[in-house]
């Protein structure tokens, strides 16, 4: 198993938020640091780096996490299979991710 840790700059736009290579991931976590103003992360996906990132849906609902500062959350299973993802916040800030892959 292989794990990697990344720091991501989050904005409130899929155009400017940082992308995360997610293609071989089996699961992952997102860590919201203490003092963060972010309380919602909405997921976008693209088939290639620097591609057109589209909102991820499960049925009719956008895939999103309600988060709080100083907590960590499992990334939703509905994004498995996405090659690249972006997490768009309700506010700008930084989050940390750990992604695990079986190689």
Image (tube, rainbow, N blue to C red):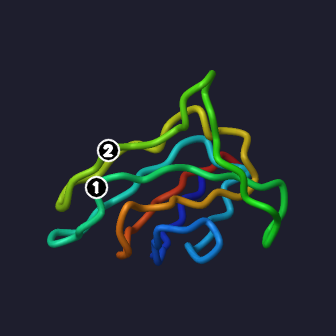
| Position in image of residue 38 (x %, y %) | 30, 63
The image quarter in which residue 33 lies:
bottom left
Residue drawn at 73 percent across, 40 percent down: 81
Tell me if residue 87 comes above or below residue 60 in the rendering.
below
| Position in image of residue 49 (x %, y %) | 79, 69
| Position in image of residue 26 (x %, y %) | 61, 41
Q: Residues within 10 Å of mark 2 (few under 14, many from 20)?
A: few
Residue at the disc numbered 2: 66
Disc marking residue 96: none
Residues at marks 2 and 1, CA–CA distance in whole angstroms: 6 Å
Residue at the disc numbered 1: 39
Q: Nearer the viewer, residue 99 or 67?
A: 67
Q: Nearer the viewer, residue 78 or 59?
A: 59
Which residue is most to the top? 59
Residue drawn at 63 percent across, 52 percent down: 44
Tell me if residue 48 comes above or below residue 25 in the rendering.
below
Q: Residues within 10 Å of mark 1 (few under 14, many from 20)?
A: some
Residue drawn at 72 percent across, 50 percent down: 24
Marks 2 and 1 in Cβ contact (< 8 Å)? yes
Left or right, 2 with reference to 89: right
Left or right, 49 with reference to 10: right
Tell me if residue 8 comes above or below residue 86 in the rendering.
below
Q: Earlier in the sequence, mark 2 or mark 1?
A: 1
Numbered disc 1: secondary structure: loop
Numbered disc 2: secondary structure: strand
| Position in image of residue 47 (x %, y %) | 83, 54
Tell me if residue 52 comes above or below residue 35 in the rendering.
above
Label total for image: 2
Residue drawn at 28 percent across, 50 percent down: 67
């Amino acid at each position: 198993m292989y794990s990697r840790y990344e720091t991501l700059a989050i904005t409130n736009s899929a155009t400017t938020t940082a992308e995360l290579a997610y293609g071989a991931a089996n699961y992952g976590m997102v860590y919201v640091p203490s003092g963060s103003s972010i309380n919602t992360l909405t997921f976008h996906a693209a088939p290639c780096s620097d591609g057109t990132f589209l909102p991820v849906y499960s049925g009719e609902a956008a895939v999103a996490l309600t988060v709080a500062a100083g907590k960590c959350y499992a990334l939703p299973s509905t994004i498995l299979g996405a090659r690249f993802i972006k997490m768009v916040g309700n506010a700008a800030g930084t989050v940390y991710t750990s992604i695990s892959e079986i190689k």
